[in-house]
Image (spheres, grey):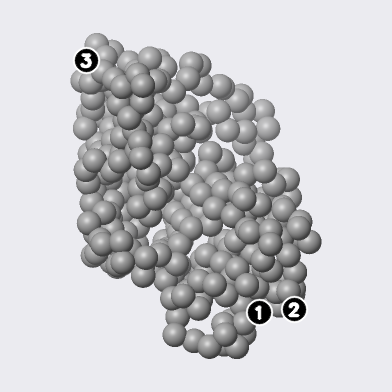
Amino acid sequence: MNTVLSVENLSTYFKTDKGIAKAVENVSFSLNKGEMLGLIGESGCGKTTVAQSILRLIEYPGKVVSGRVLLNGRDLIKASDKDLASMRWKEISVIPQSAMNALNPIFTIGDQIMESILIHENVSKREALKRTKTLLELVGIDGERWRSYPHEFSGGMKQRVAIAMALACNPKLVISDESTTGLDVLTQAQVIALIKNLQKKMDLSVILISHDLPMVTAICDKIAIMYAGNIVEWAPTEDILKNARHPYSQALLNASPDLGNPEKEVVSIPGSVPNLVNFPNSCRFHTRCPLAFDKCRQENPEFKEVRNGHYTACFLEGVGNHG
């Protein structure tokens, strides 16, 4: 399979009054053509910062301090502003977390979708309008609603419009940044099903950022689990479900309800994500890990491949079965 995106040792830091916050540190993963990757973790673990770093949207006091982000072989971190502007929407786009904030209330839905088409594609306004109507139909909205304003749409319909905007220039990679946040459960399910259907229909590569592990395991090909700025496990979804190796991954699975097994006990994870300022050189999960031992408190484990296509960062690998 062709690799569309390769993230290599990506680190993004923020200057604060109390010191340097290592929001993302040495993050590595890749995404193949037509593949959907779920990026999972608690709030504050760095998921959105990874997405913003990939898109080069980090602003002061934040900075990408190291690493490479290769989109079809081109390094987005080193790309000029002009090259980056030409690649956004056309090669890589984002479905934002809140469509209500992403849509401008004083312009029609059609004008906002057409804007990126007219900027990035050599087409007439008539052709751009035709494509806009097709995009609206694609996401389940009557094409003639292009004349409508955002306030005339429900939350779920606004999110569908945001999806249409992300697909306007036929990008190869789409990042969905918790795009169902704030929607009711039924609408969430409809939006996620729509993203999955479009991914298959258009052969898209998708990064789906979420804290909803059951939803991600149901639709994603691979899963990358983040904790406190690090990816602690990355593997095919089935492998994560059957043989998660990192204690944090196991804890997330145990903390998720299983509708197929209603008698399964749901166990919460004690404690909270650590302060990322001046974090010591140790496993970042050790204060919450029931299996931690002295080495975990003194060194940071290497993120490495433990089986074919299965990567994790845990000193317990090689010590024995800890599942």
Quarter of image, res 4: bottom left
Residue 280 position, x and y percent, is 26, 18
Depth-wise, is mark 1 or mark 3 nearer the camera? 1
**Residue 76 versus residue 119: which sits nearer the camera?**
119
Q: Indicate whether 218 appears above or below 168.
A: above
Asked if residue 15 shows in the view, the reply is: yes
Identify the secondary structure beneath mark 3. Answer: helix
Residue placed furthest toward the right = 152
Disc ID at residue 260 = none
Q: Residue at x 28, y 43 (%)?
A: 64
Disc ID at residue 144 = 2
Q: Indicate whether 315 appears above or below 177.
A: above
Residue 132 position, x and y percent, is 61, 77
Residue 128 position, x and y percent, is 57, 82
Residue under numbered circle 3: 298
Structural crowding at the residue carrying mark 2, measured as other residues with C-alpha within 10 Å and reported as few (<14), some (14–19) or many (≥20): few
Q: CA distance from mark 2 to mark 1?
A: 7 Å
**Residue 318 versus residue 64: which sits nearer the camera?**
64
Lateral position of residue 47 relative to residue 99, left or right: left
Identify the secondary structure beneath mark 2. Answer: helix
Q: Residue at x 35, y 57 (%)?
A: 31
Q: Earlier in the sequence, mark 2 or mark 3?
A: 2
Q: Earlier in the sequence, mark 1 or mark 3?
A: 1
Identify the secondary structure beneath mark 1. Answer: helix
Residue under numbered circle 1: 133
